[in-house]
Amino acid sequence: MIIQIEPQSDVPIYTQLTNQMIEGIARGDLQPGNSLPSVRSLAADLGVNMHTVHKSYQELEKKKIIRIVPKSGAVINLPKKVNLRDPLYKRIVAQCKPVIAEALVLGMRKEQIQALISTMIEDFQEKKAQNREE
Amino acid sequence: MIIQIEPQSDVPIYTQLTNQMIEGIARGDLQPGNSLPSVRSLAADLGVNMHTVHKSYQELEKKKIIRIVPKSGAVINLPKKVNLRDPLYKRIVAQCKPVIAEALVLGMRKEQIQALISTMIEDFQEKKAQNREE
DNA sequence: AAATTTGTTATAATAAATATAGAACAGAAG
DNA sequence: CTTCTGTTCTATATTTATTATAACAAATTT
């Protein structure tokens, strides 16, 4: 899987990495059960510091997306049964809220927003299906 | 409109302020044409520095949500006709993407995500309708 | 068994972002 | 005319982000 880091971005490197990992999993480039590369090797590949990658992995673990086995490696978790009461999902709502509000304020209609979200989800799932074929 | 700043949050104060302003407009607490309080008075109200409020206003202007008339004040813009090619909306997609990907990875289904977004939008519009009644 | 690689932890240094403070200016509003 | 406005400037303190080394003990590889 190809990861592109933009050092000039206002988004911190470790966040860029975290997001691209998550999107990679959503796309099926990385699958549950797979191991992530070691912090050292990935850092070398990306040309960033070991600690930056480590911080990203810690973030992914906090989000329950991977589990880290000490002295071994990071493994992508299987999706759990969704429980909307879980604080995990409240955080998702919290992150979405300002963006949805902004869309509304800029004049987007409910249907437009929903269409946007729909195509976004379908994009991920389409690429996931393609990854299953290979 | 009541604004609540949490100084301990990991979200910068100016971002908290920007988001709450946007949500206030989406809710109809603030309406297009209304003036925002001056940076000095709002800073005094919130107990934060003038420059922090100023930064938030600059952010709102960059998002085309308000216009700032030099030496006068900040006024909430009327929503323009939506043109999805506008970089404004690309930024909205860019902000949504990692959150949607995270929801998918955590096991949420398309319908669940859409339901979540729907209720969020309806919440805003409901409160907006209530504000019109008064 | 030995060598390498692993995550982890610690310390240090630098740069950038965040927040506050105070001052000053010129135009708008009263 | 006086006050208030956004704006700009300098300065400072704090936090965050990033890199750089180094070391340790467990896991893996050779």
Image (cartoon, coloured by chain):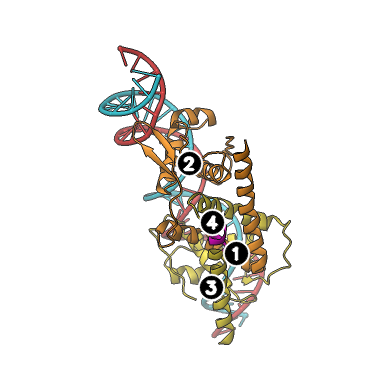
Chain colours: A yellow, B orange, C cyan, D red
Which type of secondary structure does the marked residue at label 1 adopt?
helix
Mark-to-mark CA distance, 1 and 3: 14 Å
| Residue marked by disc 3 | A123
The answer to whether marks 2 and 4 sit on the same chain is no
Magenta stretch: helix, strand or loop mostly: helix
Mark-to-mark CA distance, 1 and 2: 34 Å
Residue A92: % across, % down = 62, 57
Contact (CB < 8 A) between labels 2 and 3? no
Mark-to-mark CA distance, 2 and 3: 35 Å
| Residue marked by disc 4 | A109
Magenta-drawn segment: A109-114
| Disc on res. B102 | 1
Residue B121: % across, % down = 61, 53
Residue B50: % across, % down = 44, 32
Q: Is residue A122 above or below residue B27?
A: below
Which residue is the extreme one toward the bottom? A134
| Chain letter of disc 2 in the image | B
* Residue nearest the viewer, comparing B133 with B38: B133
Q: Is residue B29 above or below residue B119?
A: above
Mark-to-mark CA distance, 2 and 4: 16 Å
- At label 4, counting other C-alpha atoms closer than 10 Å, the crowd grade (few under 14, some 14-19, many 20 or more) is some
* Residue nearest the viewer, comparing D7 with B85: B85
What type is the residue that disc 4 sits on?
Arg
| Chain letter of disc 4 in the image | A
The label nearer to you, 1 versus 2, is 2
What type is the residue that disc 1 sits on?
Glu
| Disc on res. B32 | 2
Residue B85: % across, % down = 40, 62
